[in-house]
Image (cartoon, grey):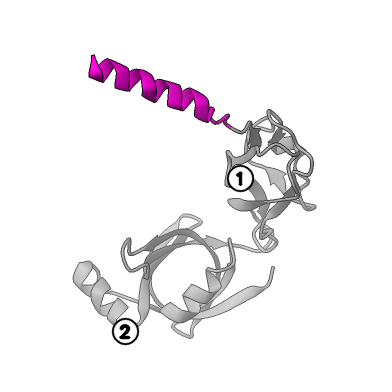
Amino acid sequence: MSEVKIAAETRSEFGKGAARRIRRDSKVPGVLYGHGSDPIHLTLPGHDLLLALRTPNVLISLDIDGKTSELAIPKSVQRDPIKGFLAHVDLLLVKRGEKVTVEIPVNAEGELAPGGNLLEHVLNALPVDAEATHIPEGVTVSVEGLEAGASVLAKDITLPNGVTLAVDEDAVVLQVLAAQAEEAPEAEEAAEGEEAAVAEA
């Protein structure tokens, strides 16, 4: 995974008023924490951060005040529930070579067996342990030909080298649900006829 470089500034103003002022300048308030160190409150460029966050678990190289450089991954991203803009981001400090626990997207490919069955994502993201600078962007699972009642367990998913499960290996990730049988029109019409007869009586 490539690193995305972002210039950040430390901030000393806190609270809703300060956050609003930061966002008016097209920037995003954030906090960098981890490794037992004191949290560092940051101001980050909104557009650059938005582009970076398009990649799940993106590795960010922070240039802080032009003095220090730190590696981080996004841990929590808050968006405005109505307008959708970035409101706040928590960043986790990481070091090269260390393992981190993250969730990676699960992408399904292929066609289910005929019959109109439905594929349910029991886990939209798979918890894994991976080296901080080699976090996979996601995993792809084939569901080709799966029939109703079939399921894909965590242990069935092939992970990249160096990546291990951080969830029970028997956890259900995907499952195929049987198509719900539609009630026959004749039965519906008969039921309506009975209701009408009762109403007339």
The residue indicated by pointer 2 is 25
SS for tag 1? strand
Q: Position of residue 75 (x, y in %)?
A: 48, 57
**Residue 44 against residue 140 in the figure, above or below:** below
Name which residue lies at 62% across and 45% down.
126
Q: Position of residue 59 (x, y in %)?
A: 60, 67
**Residue sitting nearer the eye, 145 or 48:** 145
Name which residue lies at 65% across and 48% down.
129
- Secondary structure mostly taken by the magenta-highlighted segment of the chain: helix
Left or right: where 149 falls relative to 181: right
- Residue 193 lies in the magenta-colored region: yes
**Residue 163 against residue 115 in the figure, above or below:** below
Q: Position of residue 51 (x, y in %)?
A: 53, 76
- Residue 46 lies in the magenta-colored region: no
- Please count the marks in the image: 2
Q: Is residue 100 visible?
A: no
Circles 2 and 1 in contact, beta carbons < 8 Å: no
Quote the CA–CA distance across marks 2 and 1. Answer: 35 Å
Highlighted magenta segment, given as a residue range: 180-201
Query: Which dot marks residue 118?
Result: none
The residue indicated by pointer 1 is 127
Q: Quadrant of residue 94?
A: bottom right
Residue type at mark 1: give it: Pro
**Residue 88 against residue 62 in the figure, above or below:** above
